[in-house]
């Protein structure tokens, strides 16, 4: 069966036209950025950690890609850098795998950034979220964001969840599609 990230990638390939801009709101080790850069015209990737930006710059798969812009800033500020033609915005919450586990996305800023993302993504575009309820801040993110997502106006947003239902702490994905006016 597909894991959550593979599932998210498949939906993006099926739904997002290649001439759109993609945003990776949580660069980390750059796997999602690399995926987006292979599928889309341009990618903006954000991380607050210098380590993540430096690792991505040294990633031999990413270094030759001229359609990726790496930005050391919070995803809350994404609209300062790009505000049009955005086909997809990916969030992969949590901490940098293999890095400092104390530097993790946090519920308050994650909620704020998702609100920005839902505003700036194009009509017919996607916002994808991967949650990790197996660690404390991840649980807080679920508690804070899920009720917000469940209450989005269904005329404007379709909100789907891909979830292992027999393992409470398993990561899960939420994919939001914004409808055209
Ligand atoms: C789970 S990792 C992302 C994994 C990544 N997508 C990959 O393919 O390896 C989460 C990342 O979010 C970053 N992060 C935490 N808070 C952030 C914020 N406010 N804005 C941007 N990135 C943030 C962390 O530094 C960490 O590298």
Image (cartoon, rainbow, N blue to C red):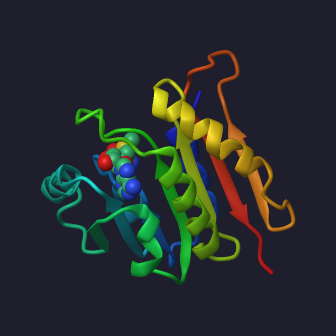
In the image as oriented, which residue stretches furthest toward the right?
155
Image quadrant assignment for residue 94: top left
Q: Nearer the viewer, residue 155 or 75?
A: 75
Quadrant into which the C terminus falls: bottom right
Image quadrant assignment for residue 172: top right
Q: Position of residue 8 (x, y in %)?
A: 56, 47
* Residue under the point 30% across and 35% down: 102
**Residue 40 in view of the camera:** no
**Residue 57 in view of the camera:** yes
Quadrant into which the N terminus falls: top right
81 displayed left or right of 18: left
Q: Position of residue 129 (x, y in %)?
A: 56, 48
Q: Nearer the viewer, residue 53 or 21?
A: 53
Q: Is residue 92 above or below residue 19?
A: above
Q: Nearer the viewer, residue 64 or 139?
A: 139
In the image as oriented, which residue stretches furthest toward the bottom?
84
* Residue under the point 68% across and 43% down: 146
Q: Position of residue 140 (x, y in %)?
A: 55, 35
Count of marks placed on residues: 0
Q: Is residue 50 above or below residue 65?
A: above
In the image as oriented, which residue stretches furthest toward the top?
166
Q: Is residue 10 above or below residue 137?
A: below
33 displayed left or right of 137: left
Image quadrant assignment for residue 143: top right
Q: Is residue 161 above or below residue 110?
A: above
* Residue under the point 58% across and 72% down: 17
Q: Position of residue 77 (x, y in %)?
A: 42, 70
* Residue under the point 63% across and 42% down: 144
């Amino acid at each position: 069966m597909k894991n959550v990230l593979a599932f998210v990638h498949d939906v993006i390939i099926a739904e997002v036209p290649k001439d759109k801009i993609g945003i990776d709101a949580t660069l980390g080790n750059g796997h999602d950025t690399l995926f987006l850069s292979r599928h889309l015209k341009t990618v903006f990737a954000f991380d607050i950690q210098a380590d993540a930006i430096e690792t991505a710059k040294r990633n031999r798969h990413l270094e030759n890609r001229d359609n990726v812009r790496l930005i050391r800033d919070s995803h809350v500020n994404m609209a300062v850098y790009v505000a049009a033609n955005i086909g997809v915005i990916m969030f992969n919450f949590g901490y940098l795998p293999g890095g400092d586990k104390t530097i993790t996305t946090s519920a308050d800023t994650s909620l704020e950034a998702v609100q920005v993302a839902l505003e700036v993504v194009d009509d017919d575009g996607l916002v994808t979220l991967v949650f990790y309820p197996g660690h404390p801040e991840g649980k807080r993110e679920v508690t804070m964001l899920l009720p917000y997502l469940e209450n989005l106006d269904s005329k404007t947003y379709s909100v789907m969840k891909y979830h292992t239902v027999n393992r409470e702490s398993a990561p899960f994905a939420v994919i939001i599609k914004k409808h055209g006016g």
